[in-house]
Image: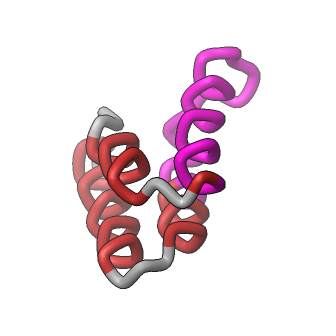
Amino acid sequence: MERAEQIAWAKKRALDLLNAGDLTGAYVSFVGDTQSLIPQHSAIPAALLDAGMDAMSRGDAEALRRWIEGFN
């Protein structure tokens, strides 16, 4: 699967969970599905993950949606 296809697939799976009200599932699904696309020893991905985790932990579905949709 090409990178763009993998991201689109990961977004769809995560957004389906988010639309069902499962914020934790959406975050975990998206991170798991895109993990291979993020360099492992980089500070930038850690900051990106923190933003999604923050939205999830606050229960802010719209912020989590923006975070998922903004991933490229």
Magenta stretch containing residue 47, yes or no? yes
Q: Is residue 50 left or right of residue 62?
A: right
The picture places residue 12, in percent across and down from the top left corner, at: 27, 66
For the point 30% across and 76% down, the residue is 19
Tell me which segment is drawn in magenta. Answer: 31-57
Give the position of the C terminus as an image quadrant: top left
For the point 48% across and 67% down, the residue is 26
Viewer-nearest residue: 26 or 58: 58
For the point 60% across and 63% down, the residue is 28
Q: Is residue 69 left or right of residue 25?
A: left
For the point 69% across and 18% down, the residue is 42
- Work out whether 11 lies above or below 67: below
The picture places residue 16, in percent across and down from the top left corner, at: 31, 76
Query: Magenta part mainly helix, strand or loop?
Result: helix
The picture places residue 70, in percent across and down from the top left corner, at: 29, 36
The picture places residue 56, in percent across and down from the top left corner, at: 57, 55
Give the position of the N terminus as an image quadrant: bottom left
Total marks in image:
0
Magenta stretch containing residue 27, yes or no? no
Query: Toward which corner of the image does residue 50 lie, by quadrant?
Result: top right
